[in-house]
Amino acid sequence: MISTSPDVLIVGAGAAGLAAAIALADAGVADIVVIDRDDAPGGLPRFCHHPGFGWEYAHYPRTGPGFARYMLNAADRPNIRILCKTTMISINAGPSVQIVGPETSYTELLPKAVILATGIRESNRGNLCVPGIRPERGIFTTGMLQQLVARRDGQLDQFRNLTVIGTEHVAFSALLTARHGGATVRHMIGCEHRIFSFPIMRLLAGVLAARIHLDTELLEIDGSSERVEALVVRQGGTTRRIACDGIVFSAGWTPETAAFVGSAVEVDPATGGIAIDQAMRSSLPGVFAAGNVLRPVESSGWAACEGRRAGQLAAKYLAGELSGVRGALHLRPGKGLKYVVPQYWDGPFVSPAGVEPLRPSARVAGDTKGALTLLSDSGREKLGKFQRLLQTRRINFSLAKQTLNSDAVIDVS
């Protein structure tokens, strides 16, 4: 049995959650409990057998399972307990957390601090409102595809003409995962005017004989009750059919915040994720957050870096060197921006020794040119140089030279 009053409870055993646990253990925290609703720890990377995971955190581009093993080996310590098949039901002030799982049954935990690292979930066909037939097989999300391949299900061998919806990083991950599982992707479709991943990925698609269709809207899925036969798309005002035997949806990621509905944990409507300040503190005192539960969607390495920072800051909170109360000044996205993280700012905050606060970042609503600016009671200040800003790239900026005494707006000018 676990203690009902651990030092720290971490919700989520993916890259961010494991990195937080490792950082807490490094800081000497004695009783760390990590829960995850999945049947094994490691998060989504353990299902992706291609390289490119963990670079920002470990400075080496491992495969997904390789990065998961790396994190789990580092977290294999007597003061870290990982409980899988265990779900957080609710969280309240205290903090007080209700969980249920095979080793705990229904239990209320009263940890000294909580780190929320529940990650993201993807939109399925229903969420994306795609009409058409509903066959017995042949419609996947990227996560479903990854799990089928990782668990060696074998049913992918029959698919020789898959279509991936999307052109962002995850779409190309789906392309590689399908190939690893014995399936063949022939088409990639995106309504965007350019590839949302790195431009070099066009070469990868060419090598794997996958044709990319840009400025293309998916209208309908066609086929029979047993299988997918074609997609109806619109491109340049022309409607046509693209023959295929399966479809993989890779777009529409959203932070996993369902368990926070109705709680005191504030969710930012712009990101769909938990609203925090630069010390990773949520609206509920003593509760921190990190990783893709903050916004969709960053790499596993970046999520792990955020988890490490949240773990370090939570350790300082336990040591009495950091308040558990979130900063009160509001940072809002203005003209041209989709969102800003963090959404709150602690004006007089001084980072504890050895720990850097979260560096602010933003994303633009659409590709543009301009410079980020800060608008506050002190006037307008430029935060960066004039440059091309892409909606698929995180824009990091600094507020180290600014003294904020009021709410502020970050925009593009």
Image: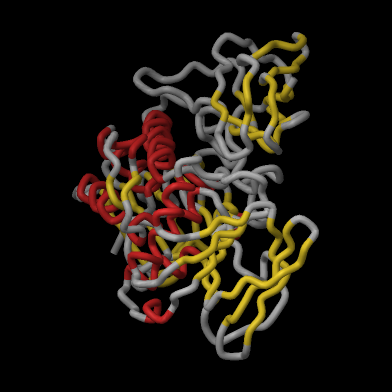
Quarter assignment of residue 402: top right
Q: Residue at x 45, y 54 (%)?
A: 205
- Residue 385, image x and y in percent? 61, 14
User: Is residue 380 rendered to the left or right of residue 52?
Assistant: right
> Residue 277 appears in which quarter of the rendering?
top right
Q: Is residue 55 left or right of residue 327?
A: left
Residue 46: image location, x then y, percent:
33, 58
Tell me: 21 left or right of 74: right
Of the pair 114 and 246, the residue shown nearer to us: 246
Question: Can residue 209 be seen from the camera position used here?
Answer: yes
Find the residue positioned furthest to the bottom: 225
Kindly identify the residue that appears in the image at 45 percent across and 19 percent down: 351
Q: Is 407 located above or below residue 177 in the figure?
A: above
Viewer-closest of 375 and 389: 389
Which quadrant holds the C terminus? Answer: top right
- For residue 11, say whether it is visible: no
Pick the quarter of the image with the N terminus: bottom left
Q: Residue at x 43, y 55 (%)?
A: 173
Left or right? Give the position of 360 relative to 351.
right
Residue 39, quarter of the rendered image: bottom left
The x, y position of residue 262, in whole percent, is 67, 56
Residue 65 position (above or below residue 391) = below
Toward the viewer: 352 or 173?
A: 173
* Residue at point 70%, 18% (across, down): 374
